[in-house]
Amino acid sequence: MSPTNELISFLENHPDAQIVMDADYRILAANAAYRRHYAGGRDVVGQTCFAVSHGYSRPCDECGESCPLAASRTSGEPNRVLHLHHTPRGEEHVDVELTPIIGASGKIEYFVERMLTVREASSFPAESGLVGKSPAFNRMLEMVRRVAPSNTAALLLGESGTGK
């Protein structure tokens, strides 16, 4: 089954990078923003999301990372993770938000994945911003991005000299 023209039109007119996938991780549609930012302008339809984003031959959760599609497929709920994606500009931290699309049958037919590059962090040293790519760093960055928009106090814990 392929996504409707309305869904594809919605994606194309959306400014954020987005793709539509099936339950087998296959990309069924990708908007221009996704192709430009994450695929170097090339067509990615028919490829798997994990191959395009990470260069993996298997899903993220089988390679030691959390996979929003696997989690959403199990729960039926939207899922959000922070990943380190391979892009035309090198490795970048990407906030990945996945939403299941329920069909007329009442079952999940598609998954829409929206990606936003995290500009506050890099896996390479830079003049400013956070630097890191370990699982612990990514978990911390995910939590910081979650609390940052609110007027809430956050306590960072850790040993002395660890760069809190």
Image (cartoon, rainbow, N blue to C red):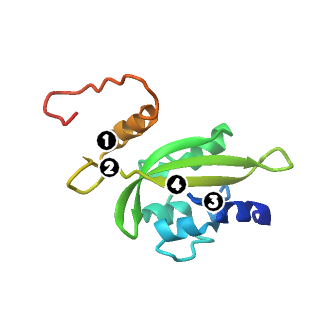
Q: Could you tell me the amino acid type at mark 3? A: His
Dot 4 or dot 3, earlier in sequence: 3
Residue 121 tag number: 2
Q: Which residue is mark 4?
A: 115
Dot 4 or dot 1, earlier in sequence: 4
x and y percent of residue 134 in the render? 30, 46
x and y percent of residue 160 in the render? 14, 28
- For label 4, the SS is strand
Front disc: 2 or 3: 3
Asked if one can make out residue 57 in the rendered structure from this viewpoint, the answer is: no
Q: Nearer the viewer, residue 117 or 71?
A: 117
Q: Could you tell me the amino acid type at mark 2? A: Ala
Front disc: 1 or 2: 2
Q: Residue at x 64, y 54 (%)?
A: 112
Q: Which residue is mark 1?
A: 137
The residue lying furthest to the bottom in this view is 42
Asked if one can make out residue 19 in the rendered structure from this viewpoint, the answer is: yes
Dot 1 or dot 3, earlier in sequence: 3
Establish if 143 lies above or below 92.
above
Q: Could you tell me the amino acid type at mark 1? A: Phe
Q: CA distance from mark 2 to mark 4?
A: 15 Å
Q: CA distance from mark 1 to mark 3?
A: 30 Å
Residue 70 is left or right of residue 145, and the answer is: right
Dot 2 or dot 3, earlier in sequence: 3
Q: Residue at x 54, y 61 (%)?
A: 49
* Circle 3 Cα neighbour tier, 10 Å, few/some/many (<14 / 14–19 / ≥20): few
Q: Quadrant of the C terminus?
A: top left
Query: Do residues under tags 2 and 4 come within 8 Å of each other at their CB atoms?
Result: no
